[in-house]
Image (tube, grey):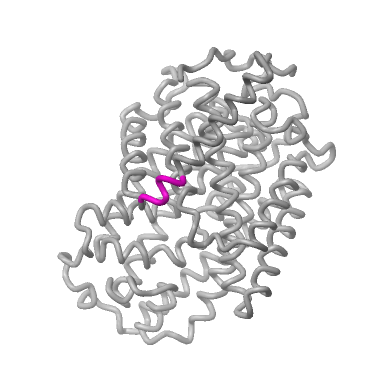
Amino acid sequence: MPPEPHPEPGASGTASTPPGGGELARRLGTGDAVMIGLGSMIGAGVFAAFGPAARAAGTGLLVGLVLAAVIAYCNAVASAQLAAAYPTSGGTYVYGRERLGDWWGFTAGWGFVVGKTASCAAMALTFAAYAVPGPGWAQRAAGVAAVLGLTALNYRGVTKTALLARVLGVISLIALAVVVAGIAASGHAGTGRLGGWSSLGTGGAYGILQAAGLLFFAFAGYARIATMGEEVRDPRRTIPRAIPLALLITVAVYLVVGVAALLAAGPQRLASATAPLATALDAAGAGGLAPVVRAGGAVAALGALLALIAGIGRTSLAMARHRDLPGRFAAVHPRYRVPHRAETALAVVVSVLVATVDLRGAIGFSSFGVLVYYAIANAAAFTQPASDRRWPRALNVLGVAGCLTLVATLPWPSIVAGVGMFGIGLVGRLLIRRHRGPVQPPAA
């Protein structure tokens, strides 16, 4: 479908002048933005992702980790460059509208909101699994309580969100440092456990790509910085610094943890583990530190859930401003300056999902949506003029190609679910717009 005409940046209804509902307050500095990004990326994934990655690629998971980091870097600099030019809420939903047209923006926003809503439920259930080893009903209750509690905190303002993101991020990093130190001090880790670099799982090059796809999603939290662009002080300077810095720290942490886990347990043992870091500690003779992994996993899941709620709320706000979601979600709280209606609605939906459905093994379409989201971000960044460019266009081309390649490595049920998700959204938008007739840009 060809892009529709869209107004120039700065015109009524564009990214630089949010239409209706009021603007958010710029309260976040570089440190706050970096910690929100770290809280999103160093989430529950690092406590679980090395297991399936080892099943796919064996020792090649480290190669997959580097590939995932390269693609994540391309996506990160594209997001940073776009966010500096369009410092408002909504992330790639806004960038797609501004650079490529309404339909591209909607596609990115729809994939983000629907896919990440499922991820919210999965993170709440992951937190409950780590924090409440009791019966299923108790875990669901704990998951709902986490969603409601973090939503209430977000409701009180973005500075509260940033403060808690700092605390949770620091605790997660301490837990990972304890794991690595415990393995290093045990004296039982060694290269002999690797089985040689020929131990690349059963999938060969495809397995490495699949491992990259699995590990990529642990990096995807830097989008949260961009989606909160309307709340960052001096966004043209802060966002391009915060996104690459948060990603660089995360890559370093993941490489250290991945190497330590492989040296302690070897790829075969990691591949069969449901809690790979705990398995690595056991293999190194440091099983007494397992409670640290459990606490770290719970805290990391909370950090990821907190950032997801904030990011989805801001994207929903942007979509509502342009009538791609119900207009009532465009409201900004007059005192706390947050998208309170969007976040409240999200909390209700996620709580129902947590209470009724086990999504931990059924959110592959969320991965599909994230990769499409970043492919559109790279395409949008490619169209920016020289005056707005901070990185070469070659990175945008590599980012698009990388995202589409990783999409192709997803299991076929995930691909089918992802195509269905986008089909529902695009057809629904088409029918609604035909019923409404031509949509005029909303008044500023």
Relative depth, front residue between 99 and 336? 99
Q: Position of residue 281 (x, y in %)?
A: 40, 80
Q: Quadrant of residue 252?
A: bottom left
Above or below 177: residue 432: above
Q: Position of residue 428 (x, y in %)?
A: 59, 31
Q: Position of residue 103 (x, y in %)?
A: 52, 24
**Residue 88 in view here:** yes
Magenta span of residues: 412-417
- Drawn side of residue 132 relative to residue 42, left or right: right
- Drawn side of residue 272 relative to residue 304, left or right: left
Q: Residue at x 57, y 13 (%)?
A: 8
Q: Main secondary structure of the magenta part?
A: helix
Q: Is residue 413 magenta?
A: yes
Q: Residue at x 56, y 31 (%)?
A: 93
Above or below 53: residue 366: above
Above or below 271: residue 162: above
**Residue 238 in view here:** no
- Drawn side of residue 82 relative to residue 322, left or right: left
Q: Position of residue 315 (x, y in %)?
A: 62, 37
Q: Residue at x 56, y 55 (%)?
A: 39
Which residue in the rendered view is the most extreme toward the right? 335
